[in-house]
Amino acid sequence: MPKLSHRAATRADIDVVHAALMAVIEESPHYNERFKAHEKARLTKRFLRALQAQDPYHVIVLLSDGQPGGALISGPEYGAIFRYWSWIFPSYRRTRLGLHGMRIFDEHWDNGKFHKAFTFVRPENEVALALLRRYGYSQTCVFKQHIFGQDYAVMERPYTKITEEYDSGMGMGRLARWTRRLNALIGR
């Protein structure tokens, strides 16, 4: 049985995670071509590094015997944590790594800062829906023709919010860009 673990992605992981993300977007039968083009343009290496700068655990690498086998990408949205993408690399798809990823995501982010976790899933993606339901997510609604004309189920899991403040998301102003560049230069 392989040893499953995870870590916040390092700057060095971004190339691997980004390449795998572009592949999973392209190969997915659930999305139309317009959505795929949009996601590939939006989810750049720069975007992933910006998420990391905000909180390293917004890009999580799932490991099997120490080797990258999947990833989870998230960000704060209006007092909730949004699962942008979570996937298992092709050679690890028939393993328990997906279940491990579901568990560690909720263990990490149900930390008192958020009301809930949520994601959008195409209603035809029965595997993703079943996995989310297994880990306590409920379908709250279906947005009809929501993203480039396609329907999306909203899947949510309640969290316990304790703190009064809210995470306002990524600061993408000049200071944030300058700080990221400086951190890259000094190897952070």
Image (cartoon, rainbow, N blue to C red):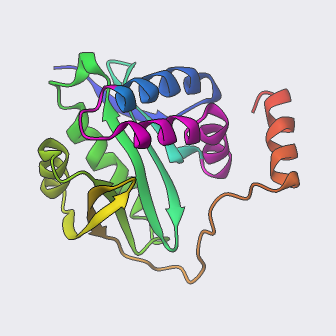
Left/right of residue 97 with respect to residue 18 in the rendered view: left
The quarter of the rendered structure image containing the C terminus is: top right
* Residue 182, image x, y percentages: 87, 37
In this rendering, the count of numbered labels is: 0
Residue 97 sits inside the magenta stretch: no
Residue lying at 82% horizontally and 56% vertically, measured from the top left: 173
* Range of residues picked out in magenta: 27-55
Closer-to-camera residue (26/156): 26
The quarter of the rendered structure image containing the N terminus is: top left
Above or below, comparing residue 99 to residue 17 in the picture: below
Residue lying at 32% horizontally and 23% vertically, measured from the top left: 89
Q: Is residue 70 visible?
A: no
Above or below, comparing residue 113 to residue 45 in the picture: below
Residue lying at 60% horizontally and 69% vertically, measured from the top left: 167
Closer-to-camera residue (34/164): 34
Left/right of residue 173 with respect to residue 58 in the rendered view: right
* Residue 68, image x, y percentages: 40, 22
Above or below, comparing residue 49 to residue 83 in the picture: above
Using the rendered view, name the quadrant where residue 56 is placed: top right
Above or below, comparing residue 160 to residue 98 in the picture: below
Left/right of residue 124 with respect to residue 180 in the rendered view: left
* Residue 155, image x, y percentages: 26, 63
* Residue 99, image x, y percentages: 20, 40
Q: Residue furthest bottom?
A: 164
Q: Is residue 49 visible?
A: yes
Residue lying at 54% horizontally and 33% vertically, measured from the top left: 9
Residue 49 sits inside the magenta stretch: yes
